[in-house]
Image: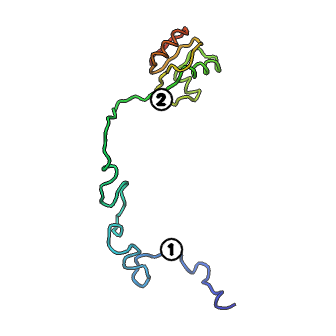
Amino acid sequence: MDLSNLKPAEGATKTRKRIGRGSGSGKGGTSTKGHKGQKSRSGYSKKVGFEGGQMPLQRRLPKFGFKPLKRVEYKAINLETLQELAEAKKLTQINPEVLMEAGLISRKHSVKILGRGTLSAKLEVSAHAFSKTAEEAITSAGGTAVKL
């Protein structure tokens, strides 16, 4: 044993800094916060998007356009998808509950049927909206399109 092997006993020293406990601690005075300035003050918290008093980016950029508050967003389902679903599960009625079980929509979605693809199955389709071509294709195949 020599001086290079000496270390304090287990639990004799603490690893955490005791800040602001006088100048003798080495961490007194400014308590590791530097001198003056906004960040040295108690209660400081930087707001989201704050750029040090400079005009923030979200206020510098121009705003334009119109976003209607009552806009309804639809989940689009094409006729080809309805045909595949009807063949796979041998369905005659398709409504939002069936589409939900198939994993095509979630509970919050409104459904719009679009006219891509062909429909040969005679289906009773219930949805929130239909495109003109989709409605024509459903009725020409012998089915009915019911708006919810």
Under circle 2, the secondary element is loop
Image check: 33 left or right of 9? left
Q: Which mark is residue 109?
A: 2
Please tell me which residue lies in front, 75 or 108: 75
Q: Callout 2: few (<14), some (14-19), or many (20+) C-alpha neighbours within 10 Å?
A: some
Q: Which of marks 1 and 2 is nearer the N terminus?
A: 1
Q: Nearer the viewer, mark 1 or mark 2?
A: 2
Under circle 1, the secondary element is loop
Q: Callout 1: few (<14), some (14-19), or many (20+) C-alpha neighbours within 10 Å?
A: few
User: How far across and down, in percent of the image, does residue 18 sit?
Assistant: 45, 76
Q: Residue furthest bottom?
A: 2
- Mark 1 → mark 2, Cα distance in angstroms: 53 Å
Q: Residue 16 carries which label?
A: 1
Q: Residue furthest right?
A: 1
Image check: 102 left or right of 130? right
User: How far across and down, in percent of the image, does residue 40 sit?
Assistant: 35, 70
